[in-house]
Image (spheres, rainbow, N blue to C red):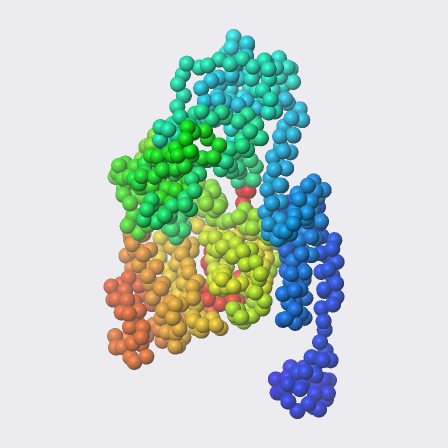
Amino acid sequence: MTWIMGSIDQSLILNLKLHKTAKDMWEYLKKVYNQDNTAKRSHLEYEIARYSQGNLSIQNYFSGFQNLWAEYVDMIYVQVPIESLADVQEVHEQSKRDQFLMKLRPKYEAARSNLMNRDLSPSLDVCFKELLREEQRLATQTILQQNKMHDNAIAYAAAHWKRQLVDNNCDVRFSRDGCIVRDQVSGKILTKGPKVGRLFPLHFSVSNFVSLASIAVSSTDNQPSNTTVRHSSRIIRPPNRYGFHTSLHTTLTSVSIPSCYSEAAKYDCWLYSIKRRLDGSLDRYKARLVVLGNKQEYGVNYKETFAPVAKMTTVRTIISIAASQGWPLHQMDVKNAFLHRDLKDEIYMVLPHGLPSSSSLDVCKLKRSLYGLKQAPRAWFDKFRSTLLQFSFKQSQYDSSLFLCKTFTGIVLLLVYVDAIVIIGTDSALIARLQQHLQASFHMKDLGPLTYFLGLEVHYDSSEISLNQHKYTQDLLKLVGLHNASPMDTPLEVNTKYSSKEGKVISNPTIYRQLVGSLNYLTITRSNISFAIQQVSQFMQHPRHLNLVVVHRILRYLRRTPSRGLFFPAGSPPHLVAYSDADWAGCPDSRRSVTGWCMFLGNPLISWKSKKQDRVSKSSTESEYRAMSAGCLEIVWLRGLLAELGFSQSNPTPLHADNTSAIQICVNPVFHERTKHIEVDCHYIREALDTRIISLPHISTTLQRADVFTNAMTQKRHQFLVSKLMLLDRSTSI
C-alpha cells in the first residue's frame, strides 16, 4: 500500500483512502484508468488490409506480412479464453493464408489459383515455399526473354562431349571457361561466350549475326536445320581428379548436354546453384552431382566425419598480428574441394535419375569423394593436410586448421576454412612457391589480397585493418523487413530479466531459430551483442512472442550501426591483456550466473565469451571465481598460440577482476570451508598464478570492460564500454 500511495499523483490519494488493502486499491486504479488497445488494433487491421506485395520480393513480402500479423495476434489472443483459443487460432491461420495469397502480384495468378483450389488447404509455410520456387522460375524465364529482346542478338551454343559444331566459315571451340567462335579462313575471333550453367551465350552485332545464321547455335528447343557436324579426332575424357568408376564414365559421356533450360530440367542428378559477387551481381551458374548422404549409416559406410575448421579467435589473432607488424594478407579458393580426395571406404552409388543404364541393378563404385558424402569434408582436409606437410609446413598444436613454416628469412602462416585459404607472412618468395604448389596440386583460384572471407569484410586504411559484416547485416535486416525500422540505442532493456514462462509460445519457432542463428554468426565481429544473443539463445526450444520482440530489438540496434566492427591499428604491441566478470544468479529460471571475459592483443579485441555457468553459485565471489577460471583457460591457450607464431609472452598476462574476495582466495594458500566446493578451480588458477602465467590486478567496476558481456546497461554506459572494445564504424566497399 505504501508503494502504491507513493507512486501515484497526490490528487488521487483521497480516492484511494476508502480502500483498505493493496489489492482493492489496484483493482480500483485498473477499473478507472485502464486503457484498451482498440485504436492500435484498428490501425493494425487497417495496415493488414492495405498491405500487398507491390514491388517486394516474395521473401520480403512474407517477412513484412508475418510481422504485422504477429503484432496483431499478440493483442487479440490476450482477450480470448483458453478454451476457445485453438478455434480462434485456426480461423486466423486460414484468414492469414487467404489474405497473403490474395495480395500477390497478378503474375502469380496461376500459382495462387493452384494453391487455393486444392482439396486440402496448404499451410502458409507451404504456400510460401511454392511461391519462392515460382518466383525463381519466373525470374529465369524473364532473363531468357530479355536476352532475346536485347539490342545485340544473343544465341546459345551447346557443347557435346565428342564433337564440335561448325559451319562453312566458322569454327566453334568449347572449353571449361567458355566458347570461342573463329573465322576458319582468317582465324579472327568473331565472338566469345562465357559458360552459364551448361549453355554458352554468344553476343553478336546484328550484321554479324545475320552473316552467321548457319552457325550451330540455338536459343530454343529446336536445332537449326542447316547445322553441320564435324567430329573431332581428339579424345575427350572427364578430368582424372573427378575419378568416377569406369561404368559411370561411360554413362555420363552418353548423356547429351541440354541446349536450353527446359532440357536441363529433365535430369534430376544435378544440383544447381547461383554464385554472386560481393555487390550482389551474378557471377556464374554452378551444377554439381550430389549424393544422398542422409542414406548412409554410421559404422556401415562411414565412421569419422568431423573436418577441422579454423577457430574465429585464430582468424582475429592473425589479422591483429598482420596489422601490427604490417604483414600482407593473401586469399585463395579451392574449386570443387570435396572432389580432390580418394576414398578409403568402399562406397557404391545408385545411378542418378535420368542416366541410361543396361540394367536396373547397375551401380557406381566411387573412387573419389563427392559432395553429399558424410566423409567428404574429412577426406578433403586429409588430402590438403598431407599436401602441406610434404611442402615442409607444420600443423599447429593449438589450431589444427593452422599451418606454419619458419625459414631464415621469415615465417609463413596458412589458415584454411573448408575451401577458403588465407596466407600471411614475411617470406614473399616462400609465399609465391606455396601458391604455385597449391595450384599444381589442386584447381585453385587466386583472389589476391584478403577482402572478403566467410562473410567478413576486410578493409585497409594505410596499414590499419578493420573487420566488419556490413553486407551480412544489411541482408539480414532486409530479410526480416526491418531495414527501414527505427533504430535502438542498446540491444536490451535495462533491469529486465527474461523467463521461459512469460508470454505465449510461438506456433512456428523456425523463424525465431533462424534469426538467432544468424545473429550468433554476427558475434564474430560484433562483440557488443554477445550478451544479448546469449540471452535469447536460451529459449530456442520453446520460444515465446516476448523473446521474438527482444530479437527484433537487437536487429533494430544493428540497424543504427550496420558497418560497426573490429579495428586493428598498426603498431599495436602484441601483449595479451584479459578481463573477467560475472553476473551472480542472473537467470530467473535456474539462478545460474553468467560468465563474461574478453582478451586483447595490445589494443584490439581478439577473443570474448558470454555464457551461462553450468552450476549454481552460492555467492557472488564463487561466480566471479568461476569466471576467472574460464578466462584463465583461454589465456593459457592464447599464450601457447602466440608463442608458436613467434610472439611469446615474457610477462604474466594480467587478468583484471573487480571482486576483491575472489582475488584474495587466489592469493591465500589456505583453503576455507566456503571454498572447498570450488577446490579444483582454486588449484588451477593458483597454479597459473604461481607459474607466472597470469597476474590478478584489481580494477574498478566502472572500468571493467567485461561488464558488457554480463549485463544489459544504459545507453551512456553501453557506448562507453563499446568504445573500450575497439568497435568502430568503418566505411565499406560494398
Q: Name the image quarter holding residue 302.
A: top left
x and y, in percent, of residue 427 in the image: 32, 38
Q: Is residue 417 visible?
A: no
Q: In this rendering, is residue 292 above or below 247?
A: below
Residue at image x 48%, y 17%? 164
Q: Is residue 552 left or right of residue 106?
A: left
Q: Residue at x 31, y 75 (%)?
A: 677
The correct choice, above or below, for 730 with respect to 221 in the image is: below
Report the quarter where the N terminus lies. Answer: bottom right
Establish if 492 lies above or below 265: below
Judge left or right: residue 23 versus residue 372.
Answer: right
Front-most of residues 339 and 426: 339
Q: The C terminus is located in which quarter?
A: top right
Camera-side residue of 690 and 419:
419
Find residue 44 and report its horizontal and vertical position in percent: 71, 60
- Residue at position x 72%, y 78% in the image: 33
Q: Quadrant of residue 662?
A: bottom left
* Residue farthest top in this picture: 185
Residue 687 visible in rendering: yes
Residue pictured at 31% horizontal, 63% vertical? 694
For this rendering, which residue is in front, 47 or 283? 47
Judge left or right: residue 467 versus residue 155. Answer: left
- Spot occupied by residue 105 in the image (x, y as percentages of width and height): 70, 44
The image shows residue 227 at horizontal and vertical percentages of 56, 14
Number of marks in the image? 0
